[in-house]
Image: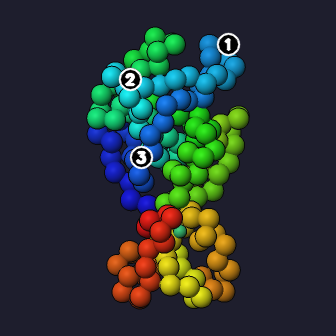
Amino acid sequence: MIWKSVGHSDLFTGGKPVLIRSLLLATESGDVHRYRVCSEAGKPVWARLAKDSEGKIGVLVTGPYSEVLKIPSRREVQPYLFVPLNSLSKKMQKKLLIPLNCELYEEENILVAKEVQSEPYYVASRNSSVFHYPGCKRARKVLPQNRICFNTRNEALHAGYRPHKICKP
Ligand SMILES: [Zn+2]
């Protein structure tokens, strides 16, 4: 995956953002609670994959247009939050992880992803004409003997493959 510098922190972001309205965050007593998050104007905020200097991948949450984000019930206003993957619903985690070839592991109840190969690459099967992001469900089902990898999107297109309509590589 291609990672870009965020600018305002030492994090790098990648993939497409998803809109979210709530986050699971720890309370002061250590319990986990679902909090509503929104922009200053009350709109949904953006969540995208982000990686820290150790290569641990979590989620960067920001206001949609670099505005600040608010957690109304905690009366908090933040420029951004870097949270573990399991602060988001399973569905949103899956959406975010599609472009990534990663291993997931838990560290003290925190779900972390580590990238297996940092170069962007795409996966296809010898038996089909579509190519995928490595994290796509369909890419994971391709048997090793049928698996073809491309380093760039163009390579896949030149080899006659078309982008999968679901993971949109
Ligand atoms: Zn796919």
What amino acid is found at the position of numbered circle 2 in the picture?
A: Gly
Tag 3 near tag 2, CB within 8 Å: no
Please tell me whether mark 3 or mark 2 is closer to you in this view. 2
**Of residues 157 and 100, the one drawn nearer to the viewer in this rendering:** 157
Q: Which mark is residue 97?
A: none
Query: Is residue 143 toward the left or the right of residue 162 in the image?
Result: right
Residue 123 appears anywhere in the view: yes
Image check: 110 left or right of 55? right
Pointer 1: what residue?
A: 29
- Callout 3: SS: strand
Q: Is mark 1 within 8 Å of ligand 1?
A: no
Please determine whether, in this image, residue 56 is positioned above or below residue 31.
below
Mark 3 beta carbon near ligand 1 (under 8 Å): no
Left or right of 117: which side holds 34?
A: right
Please count the marks in the image.
3
Looking at numbered disc 1 in the image, what kind of residue is underneath it?
Ser
Tell me if residue 100 comes above or below residue 5 in the rendering: below
Earlier residue among tags 2 and 1: 1
Marks 1 and 3 close (CB-CB < 8 Å): no
Mark 1 and mark 2 in contact (Cβ < 8 Å)? Answer: no
* Secondary structure under the numbered disc 2 in the rendered image: loop
Residue at image mark 2: 42
Residue at point 52%, 75% (across, down): 123
x and y, in percent, of residue 15 in the image: 42, 54
The amino acid type of the residue labelled 3 equals: Pro
| Residue behind mark 3 | 17
